[in-house]
Image (cartoon, rainbow, N blue to C red):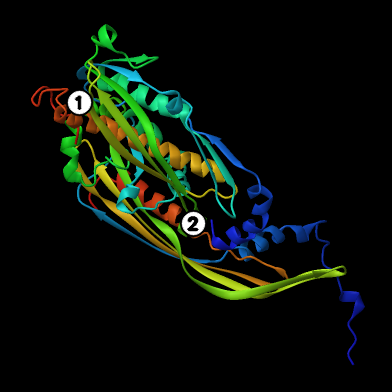
Amino acid sequence: MHRYFIRVALLLVPLAVGCDQALTVPNTFPEPVVEPLPLDVALYFSDEFTNYRYQENVPGESAWDIELGKANVALFESVSRRLFRSATRVASRPTGPAAAGFNAIIEPSVAAFEFSLPSQSATEQYSVWIRYTVKIFRSDGELLTAWNISAYGESGSTLLRPARSMQQATLLALRDAAATLTVGFLKEARARGILPMENVDAPAP
Amino acid sequence: MPQRPDSHWRSPPPLPAGYWRLPVPLLLALAATGCVTSRVEETKNTATGISDDESVVILATSYHQGNKTEADFLECVNDKLDGARDSFNIYPGAKFRDDLFPWFEPRLMPQGIEALPELLARPGVAQRISERGVRYLVWVKGSTERTSGGGGMSCAASTVGGGCFGLVWWENEGSYEATVWDLKKGQNAGGVSTDVRGTSMVPALIIPLPFVARTQTAACSGLVRELREFITQEGPS
């Protein structure tokens, strides 16, 4: 869309932009095409993670309210279903005999969420950065690693539909995180001794 | 002064009612279109061709590599290729990315044909591609940018009316490349590219009249026309 029309439309935008922008990120993700790792894992999602919501009031722009919790859970469940021999969601982090059946306990959290609007970046892109911290515990409760996954997504601006562009950029960032989780877990598992170095062929690039 | 011989004068046959309405949309359409010039090029490395049970996937190259291909441009290419009567099967790019997740995500997608063997060797990847009958991957990169512009316009309004005066103009340049990978042969079959330049203007004498060059649409049409020929014509160009 040409900038002349963007300018004309911008005259109309205050009618729309005065409103808050609220969006829920879609929570369906494809399962990765990989050979499962020989691991039985427990997935523990904290309340903060499952109800994660990012809110920011951009000066001179809209207030943004991005609901990410359900998408967070769907992302980790979808990847884990295929990446591991078995993945069991648990209500609390298992300890003692309850943890004995698992090779690892995975607890992700959102360490940071940021976005930039076209007006901030002087481009026509909405950009989203998400950083997850994935804590991996041994079955005896020892923390093996706090693995940081950085993800990025961007989407072109859609005239008069900023929430849709932000939603698309966020979804792409989530898929980026899923991709990193899929290809990076084996390396992390080997480095932390969860898997022996020669156990399986790497699905990673 | 000679007189016209009335006896020989015949009035012309009457025109149908509303005759003046016919050219108006045509004139308006012409007036509302700016000037567009385009150039298309093709490079073919190997013979192509496609059968009825094979399909083509159109994907944008990664934004991690700085590509800014617009989503609506890709949509235009997909729609025009899919909608043509004599065209081939198009497998939706979004579905293909889901089916092969995560290997065609921007972070992991192959950056060159040399990465293809490694990708196809991954468990399940070659099988899924084969099951879907995908023969060609078309990688699109490029974008439409504003290259120059100028002029000015001022508008005023009062209780008795209003109007604008001035001239605004701008020039857009669309540059796109489509690289075609033949997955059956595991080769880069070549590619097509298009460069389109469009000049638009909005003169205003009381009422602004936009003459908008549809640069991106012209680039899409040019690329699609060339791609269709590239894939369906079997011999090297």
Mark 1 lies on residue: B123
Q: State the image coordinates of residue B86 (x, y, percent, origin top left).
A: 42, 40
Q: Using a 10 Å C-alpha cutoff, classify the residue at mark 2 as few (fewer than 14 neighbours), some (14 to 19) or many (20 or more).
A: few
The answer to whether residue B155 is left or right of residue A70 is right
Chain under label 1?
A: B
On screen, residue A146 above or below B193? above
Residue beneath the point at 24% across and 13% down: A102
Determine the CA span between mark 2 and mark 1: 42 Å
Q: Quadrant of residue A43?
A: top left
Q: Nearer the viewer, mark 2 or mark 1?
A: 2
- Assess whether mark 1 and mark 2 are in contact (beta carbons under 8 angstroms): no
Q: Quadrant of the C terminus of chain B?
A: bottom left
- Kindly tell me whether residue B32 is visible in this rendering: yes
Residue beneath the point at 21% across and 22% down: A35
Determine whether the residue tagged by mark 1 lies in a helix, strand or loop.
Answer: loop
Chain under label 2?
A: A
Q: State the image coordinates of residue A151 (x, y, percent, origin top left).
A: 34, 40
**Which label was assigned to residue B27?**
none
The answer to whether residue A188 is left or right of residue A11 is left
Mark 2 lies on residue: A120
- Kindly tell me whether residue A30 is visible in this rendering: no
The answer to whether residue A153 is left or right of residue B207 is left
Q: State the image coordinates of residue B217 (x, y, percent, origin top left).
A: 49, 54
Q: Give the residue type at disc 1.
A: Pro
Determine whether the residue tagged by mark 2 lies in a helix, strand or loop.
Answer: helix
Query: Which residue extends farthest bottom?
Result: B1
Q: Give the residue type at disc 2.
A: Gln
On screen, residue B160 above or below A89? below
Return the residue nearer the eye: A69 or B68.
A69
Q: State the image coordinates of residue A49 (x, y, percent, origin top left).
A: 43, 28
Residue beneath the point at 29% across and 37% down: A148
Q: Quadrant of the N terminus of chain B?
A: bottom right
